[in-house]
Amino acid sequence: MRHAYVVMLHNEYGFSLDQMDEELSPLAGRGSARARADIVVWRTVQDKADSKTPLIVIECKSDNVTIKAADYAQGEAYALYCNAPFFVTHNNRETRYWRVKKDRMPGEIDEIENIPHADASDKDIRELIEKLKTFKEDEFADLLHSCHNVIRNREHLDPAAAFDEIAKVLFVKVWVEREMKAKKRRVNLFTADYLDEQLGTHPLNELFQQTKEAFADDRIFGNDDRINLKLATGREIVRLLERYNLSDTSEDVKGIAFERFLGKTFRGEIGQFFTPRTIVEFMVRMMAPKEGDVVCDPASGSGGFLIRFFELVRESILAEVDREYQGFVAELDKKKLSESKRAELLREKYAELQATIDQRKRDSRLWKLANRCIYGCDANDRMARTSKMNMIMHGDGHGGVHHHNGFINVNGIFEGRFDILLTNPPFGANVEPSDHITDTDVKTSDDEYRRYAETYGQLYKEAHGRVNAAKGKPIASVFDLPRRGGDGKKLGKVKTEILFIERCLALLKPGGRMGIVLPEGIFNNPSLGYVREFCEDRARILAVVSLPQETFYSSGASVKASLLFLGKFTSKEQADFEKKRDAAKAEVEAKYADETAAETARLETEIGAAKKAQDAKRRKKAQYELVNYLARIAETKTREVRAVLKERFDYPIFLYEAEKVGITATGEPDTNELYTNSNMPAGITPEDTCLELFRRFRKKPDAVASPVSVGR
């Protein structure tokens, strides 16, 4: 809101109202009447009176939308015309500061750290103009990689250990910037100069201890964790990072940059924790997330699914609030009101709406999104910590992420709780019979238990009780699928991806939906038919999208994968399914009842006769025939029941074979047919993308043609 920023310029920067003006259009009559400035600030009152060059031009935009590059044009045009050295783009979400480059073409502007205060000297202004602040994605990713190399070269750490130290320093930087913003401090503690002025043995570690206290509830770091860098190395990392302000940089830029740094640093080492961004985007959009949905990723890796869910829902909330405000403005315009009354009503409505989306305000819409709707865990402590940092870089929502085994309940992650499950579980590993649920897996302090019970209610207490009751037992023993192998016997070990299918279905609410990356063997291996039937007994198969062989090459995986999308049965659907299944079983049982009784009686008579004749060989042969017959007839009946059930509980399934998914085998960008984007293959229109075909298919399956096939 423009008036709020005027107040900020007065209260925080020290400019008087007499140094400012609003809604100026000096270019009118000069061939560019559209160029105007929302707020103009002169260095002195006299400069304004004399119509001298202004100091700052401010361009205000609609409050709850992301400011795009195209939005800078008006402010830049005004600043260029009147020779102002600074201009600002501002709305409630972000404020960005720019220096005007008179020797460049329009559009070639540099972002800087801040604008000058009213008492700034000429020297202060010159220095401020030189303090470039934010960065492009590649620039920040390269900078982080440079920091990583400094640590490796100076401290002789392996890549993962060097990354851990960068993560600690970045957390310090995030905390310092938040403190500066919250407490309106002008002194930046995250500078090499500040470190030089301190008398402590390791001032960076002292800042790290304060940071740990601020993030204590998130358990990102252990009590004994410290920055394991020599003072000179830590100072050099701070020097490289200090000029960039993460707090005021758009989440898109710093978030993508952080992910690129992760990929560049760890490719081939922990690549399995990174799902390609295009796959993440597609899977999240297939789920059609909305406000109020609660999401979980029980193998969250770098947090990609959770971050994109957060971003899309946040965008929809902010857009809705903006539409409501604009609608209110339109309604006021229809009424005959004085300017003062109109301004009063607008201020009241603005304050009312902003309170609903203040992420710092408990129970606001964005607070609920960040603190009550996003959950994940990863068994790798480094990746759990990385996903928290990644989420902070993208705008937060990290509090629901835990370092924990994804198969075991923790905090708000328990059965029957989620609207959406999105995950790319580890492939190929096994859960061994020796993998037991330990005391550490279920340990919860009294304070935590009370807090979680208060937040999640009776469902949490029951879920916590189930885990406690399973303590000491093999992890696989609490699942059904390990006991449903081809012969029905309990398996000694089971693939992790199979357990994750069951885990995700269990975590979903009735009517919830999920998307999971799976090796294609799950879909076509005859020995895994029981896994497919397990899914069919609990959920509708919404879609199967087959990916190119090379999709995950750059992440270190060579297996060909597909994306499985399921919708868990509602209570009504589950009851309908079970009723039809029971009816099918009864019909098939009746069909084979006489035959089974007769053949069983015949073989039992043969066994009895052989036993009476003390003919052991004959008896064993008859027993063997009986066992084999019963197994064959059971298999036949199961197969026929499934066939009858598919006829009576029939529905179409969306099947799609993708060729271009936005990433090459080496991890470079490629054309992408999955959803509407700026790099679609030739001949593919937005209406032809996989996502749009799926949406049309859901409304009218018969209307969707090749390359989609419909099957059951």
Image: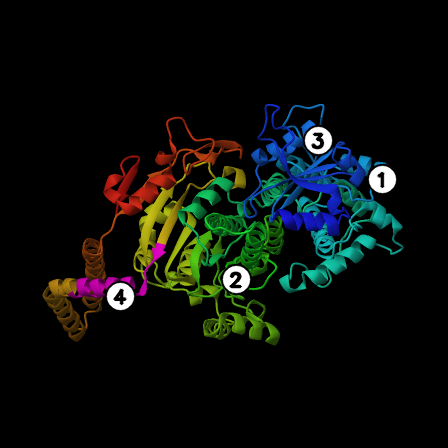
What residue appears at the point 36 percent right and 40 percent down from the top-left corner? 692
Q: Are marks 1 and 4 in contact (CB under 8 Å)?
A: no
**Between discs 3 and 4, the one toward the N terminus:** 3
Which one is closest to the eye, mark 4 or mark 2? 2
Q: Are marks 4 and 2 in contact (CB under 8 Å)?
A: no
Position of residue 690 in the picture relative to residue 394 (left or right): left
Q: Main secondary structure of the magenta part?
A: helix
Depth check, mark 3 against mark 4: the one in front is 3
Q: Which residue is mark 1?
A: 121
Is the residue 688 above or below the residue 66 in the image?
A: above
Region in magenta = 567-586
Q: Amino acid at mark 2?
A: Arg
Dot 2 corresponds to which residue? 372
Sequence-earlier tag: 1 or 4: 1
Residue 178 rendering spot, x and y as whole percentages: 70, 54
State the separation of the CA atoms marked 2 and 1: 47 Å
Q: Say if mark 2 contacts mark 3, CB within 8 Å.
A: no
Q: Which residue is mark 3?
A: 100
As helix, strand or loop, the secondary structure at mark 2 comes to: helix
Frontmost residue, 499 versus 375 = 375
Mark closest to the chain's N terminus, 1 or 3: 3
Q: Residues within 10 Å of mark 1 (few under 14, many from 20)?
A: few
In the image, 502 versus 83, the foreground residue is 83
Amino acid under label 3? Val
Q: Is residue 351 left or right of residue 9?
A: left
Looking at the rendered structure, the kind of residue marked 1 is Ser
SS label for mark 3: loop
Label 2 or label 1, whichever comes before in sequence order: 1
Please identify, in this view, whether the residue under mark 2 or under mark 3 is nearer the observer: 3
Residue 93, compared with residue 210, is above or below; it is above
Q: Which residue is mark 4?
A: 575
